């Protein structure tokens, strides 16, 4: 365990073995075992949806699907805890397929309930891109439901987009050809090479909530980074969405900076499908 720890860090590192390393490894293994059962039996898995809003009009233009996993004791296990485990173990391939099949199916449910025209943003991991069946399964999910590909947006994180240029560019190019939209999630937290970013066939940058949080606060850096990303998007011809909007002030500042789209607790937390539909209808009427 200590050797693995040392190897996973910078070169030339060393670690002493301690008993809590073994305990941490064991609890990760237990969690992995539970997750494997959950994915195999589609048990305790749910998608929640968070609306995406056009700032000028207040119109709902889409939703982001966020996975929720209810563990054996009924409480939710946070995606931050299990997504990395799912990636590391390869389970993300099946889990991710379940996510996009469920999310695409959900659009059909919304359409028949009168919530027409919204787009669905789905998070995908680089590991899924390496799965030879990824595109086939995605296409099958779209064909089965008749959902237009341009209503699907895949979110890949900035760090992931920068990892494996050949794979990423090849897959993104195919996705674009299918008509699917692509957004770079958590933008500004990784260290994008701008030259490389320019080569990626993407539609949108998603400003990380760390920069939104600092908007309007004494720390001016957040505002200047948000402003820079908006400017970068405009000059590269990309759309922008800001995530993590919690206050009316942040929304107004972003609108003033020219940010077209927003997502955050100010509008709604991620909620289950029934709650999302009720929220959307109530908003239409007000
Ligand atoms: P993300 O894609 O950047 O998702 C945004 C996260 O910010 C979500 O956390 C959401 O609940 C939270 N959030 C939204 N609005 C606000 C706000 O106003 N304030 C604050 N403080 N937080 C806000 P969540 O649902 O815990 O997801 C965490 C991460 O897990 C996601 O970050 C995404 O990277 C990953 N994830 C979630 N679902 C999936 C999935 O289906 N597949 C993959 N590969 N990753 C997923
Ligand atoms: Mg996301
Ligand atoms: Mg994000």
Image (tube, rainbow, N blue to C red):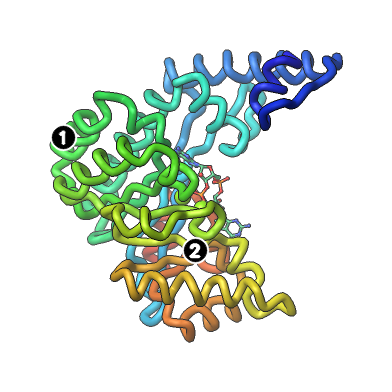
Q: Is residue 39 above or below residue 215?
A: above
74 or 248: nearer the viewer: 248
Dividing the picture into quadrants, the one containing residue 203 is bottom left
Dividing the picture into quadrants, the one containing residue 79 is top right
Q: What element does badge 2 sit on?
A: strand
- The numbered disc on residue 207 is 2
Q: Is residue 72 left or right of residue 37?
A: right
Q: What element does badge 1 sit on?
A: helix
Counting other residues with Cα less than 10 Å from the Cα at mark 2, is it few (<14), some (14-19), or many (20 or more)? Answer: many
| Residue 263 drawn at (x, y percent) | 48, 64
120 or 277: nearer the viewer: 120
- Residue drawn 32% across and 69% down? 236
Instruction: Give the Cα distance between marks 1 and 2.
Output: 33 Å
128 or 162: nearer the viewer: 162
Residue labelled with disc 1: 144
Q: Is residue 264 left or right of residue 22?
A: left
- Residue drawn 35% across and 41% down? 165
Sequence-earlier tag: 1 or 2 = 1
| Residue 29 drawn at (x, y percent) | 64, 14
| Residue 52 drawn at (x, y percent) | 41, 63
Dividing the picture into quadrants, the one containing residue 265 is bottom right
Q: Quadrant of the C terminus?
A: bottom left
């Amino acid at each position: 365990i200590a050797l693995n720890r040392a190897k996973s860090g910078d070169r030339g590192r060393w670690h002493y073995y301690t008993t809590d390393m073994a305990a941490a490894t064991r609890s990760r293994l237990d969690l992995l075992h539970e997750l494997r059962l959950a994915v195999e039996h589609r048990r305790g898995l749910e998608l929640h949806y968070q609306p995406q809003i056009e700032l000028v009009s207040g119109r709902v233009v889409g939703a982001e699907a966020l996975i929720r996993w209810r563990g054996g004791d009924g409480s939710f296990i946070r995606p931050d805890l299990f997504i990395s485990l799912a990636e590391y173990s390869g389970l993300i391939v099946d889990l991710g397929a379940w996510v996009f099949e469920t999310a695409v199916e959900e659009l059909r449910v919304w359409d028949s309930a009168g919530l027409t025209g919204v787009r669905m943003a789905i998070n995908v991991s680089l590991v899924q891109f390496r799965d030879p069946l990824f595109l086939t399964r995605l296409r099958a999910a779209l064909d089965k439901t008749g959902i237009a590909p341009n209503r699907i947006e895949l979110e890949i994180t900035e760090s992931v987009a920068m990892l494996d240029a050949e794979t990423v560019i090849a897959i993104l190019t195919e996705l674009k050809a299918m008509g699917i939209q692509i957004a770079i999630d958590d933008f500004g937290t990784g260290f994008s090479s701008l030259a490389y970013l320019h080569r990626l066939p993407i539609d949108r940058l998603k400003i990380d909530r760390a920069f939104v949080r600092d908007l309007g606060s004494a720390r001016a850096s957040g505002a200047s980074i948000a402003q820079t990303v908006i400017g970068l998007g405009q000059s590269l011809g990309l759309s922008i969405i800001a995530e993590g909007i919690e206050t009316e002030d942040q929304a107004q500042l972003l609108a003033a900076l020219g940010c077209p789209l927003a997502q955050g607790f100010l509008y709604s937390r991620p909620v289950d499908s029934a709650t999302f539909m009720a929220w959307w209808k109530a908003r239409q009427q007000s």
